[in-house]
Amino acid sequence: MMVEQALDMYMKNTTELTDLVGERIHFVKAPQGETFPYIVFFAVSDPPFHDIPARRPRFQISIWSKNKYEALKIKDVVSRMLQRYKGKMGGSGGVRVKQGVELDSPVFYERNTHSYHIPVDFKIIYLEA
């Protein structure tokens, strides 16, 4: 299983998160006209380790909402889910995560969509199969 698929499954199977965004969790791009709030995530970079069979991709998990406090609440849930996460992500056949590390989470207001955007950057360190 690819780490992107494991992360997608993990987020979509976490009730605390889906209670806030429903099934509106998208890889790379949200459908045009998507209902707020929603999440879009993608890998920003994936530098290899040179001497061990592990990866450490950096993901941006973008939270979009019309309400800043709702966006911050969703951000808190995502942070609790992934910060220091260890274990099998994505169920059986999933990815063996050694650690999730939050890097940054600024808050922006997007004037063109009149919405709040919190791009949460995470590094997910995992062992290759």
Image: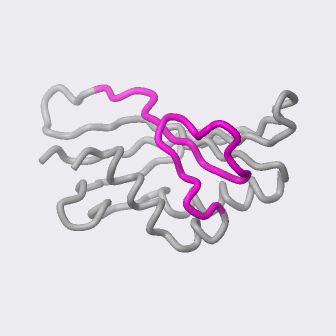
Location of residue 90 by image quarter? bottom left
Residue at the image position 20 percent from the left and 47 percent from the top: 127
**Residue at the spot 53% in from the left edge and 73% down from the top edge:** 15
x and y percentages locating residue 28 in the rendered image: 49, 35
Left or right of 67 on screen, residue 25: left
Residue 48 part of the magenta segment: no
Q: Is residue 48 above or below residue 20?
A: above
Figure colour scheme = one colour
Q: Position of residue 66 (x, y in %)?
A: 83, 49
Q: Nearer the viewer, residue 28 or 48?
A: 28
Is 23 contained in the magenta span? yes
Residue 18 lies, in percent from the top left, at 57, 67
Image quadrant of residue 108? top right
Q: Is residue 33 left or right of residue 23?
A: right
Asked whether, in this view, residue 53 is left or right of residue 26, the answer is left
Position of residue 120 relative to residue 47, above or below, is below
Q: Which residue does the image show at 82% across and 34% down from the upper left?
A: 113
Image quarter for residue 94? bottom left
> For the point 13% across and 30% down, which residue is it?
51
Q: How many marks?
A: 0
Q: Is residue 120 left or right of residue 94?
A: right
The magenta-colored residue range is 21-47
Image coordinates for residue 80, horizontal then vertical, percent: 55, 63
